Every structure is written in C-alpha cells, then in structure tokens.
Image (cartoon, grey):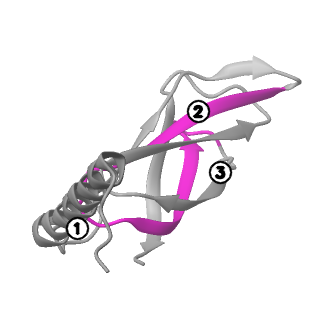
Amino acid sequence: MRMSWNWLEGVVFTASCVLVALVLGYLAVEAWTTGHGPPDLTVQVGTPVHGGGEWRVPITVTNHGDTAAEEVHVRVSPRGGRTPKEETEFVLAYVPRHSKREGWVSFREAPSPEGVEARAMGFATP
C-alpha cells in the first residue's frame, strides 16, 4: 500500500532538512575556523561614581581571543603614592570569546587624580 504525501508534509519535511543542513554546516565552519590560542583579555576602567558612602568604579573585561576564559581574576587599585594602597579584586565566572563582561568595585576613599588601574591577574581555560 502506497501512502500519498500531503503538500504541507512535503514542505515541512523539506524545510526541516534544509534547517538541519544549515545548522550542521554552521557548526562545522565554527569548529574549523575557531582558533586555538589563549584568551586575549584587556581591562578598561570607567568613571568612578560616588554613592552610599563609597566610590564605585565600573570595570569592563574584553576577550579579543578565539578561546573563552573562566574564573577571570581582576585586581583594581588606585594609582598614586597613597599608603597603604587600597586594592580590591573580583572574579568573572566566564568571558566568552570576542565578548565583554562588566563588573563593579568599591573603594572607601575617593580615587586619586591619577585614576584607577586594573588588570587581569589570571584565568582558566575551559
């Protein structure tokens, strides 16, 4: 016994096959072109904001590399000759390749006119 196809079934079947082929092609191209180097992290410091008795500073970590970074430890400290130097740290759980993640740190005293410096201290690769 031969079953006939409804025209709608044919369209849905064809569209499904095309979508599956496109997804597989995309995954193959991504796997082929993704680099294998380490993450390339840069850290940018935003403008300090005063509020709640503290100075809050936005920090942006950008991953320019082709590999993701996990557990990114960032250390932030005011520039200048203040002693003792107030430092703070935070951890970003995950920074995907070619993306940005943001965080905030707090200081008790106003940052010096020289500004604030930040750098990525270390990370893990997945």
Q: Mark 1 belongs to which amino acid?
A: Leu
State which tag comes first along the sequence, 2 or 3. Answer: 2
Q: Crowding near pointer 2: few (<14 within 10 Å), some, many (20+)?
A: some
Residue 23, above or below 116? below
Q: According to the image, label 2 marks what residue?
A: 58
State which tag comes first along the sequence, 3 or 1. Answer: 1
Q: Is residue 40 left or right of residue 59?
A: left
Q: Position of residue 27 (x, y in %)?
A: 23, 66
| Kind of element beneath mark 2 | strand
Q: According to the image, label 3 marks what residue?
A: 87
Q: Is residue 1 left or right of residue 25?
A: right
Q: According to the image, label 1 marks what residue?
A: 24
Q: Mark 2 belongs to which amino acid?
A: Pro
| Kind of element beneath mark 3 | loop
Label 3 or label 1, whichever lies nearer to me, is 1
Which residues make up the magenta segment? Answer: 54-82
Label 2 or label 1, whichever lies nearer to me, is 1
Tell me if label 3 and label 1 are in contact, CB under 8 Å: no
Q: Which quarter of the image is occupied by the C terminus?
A: bottom left
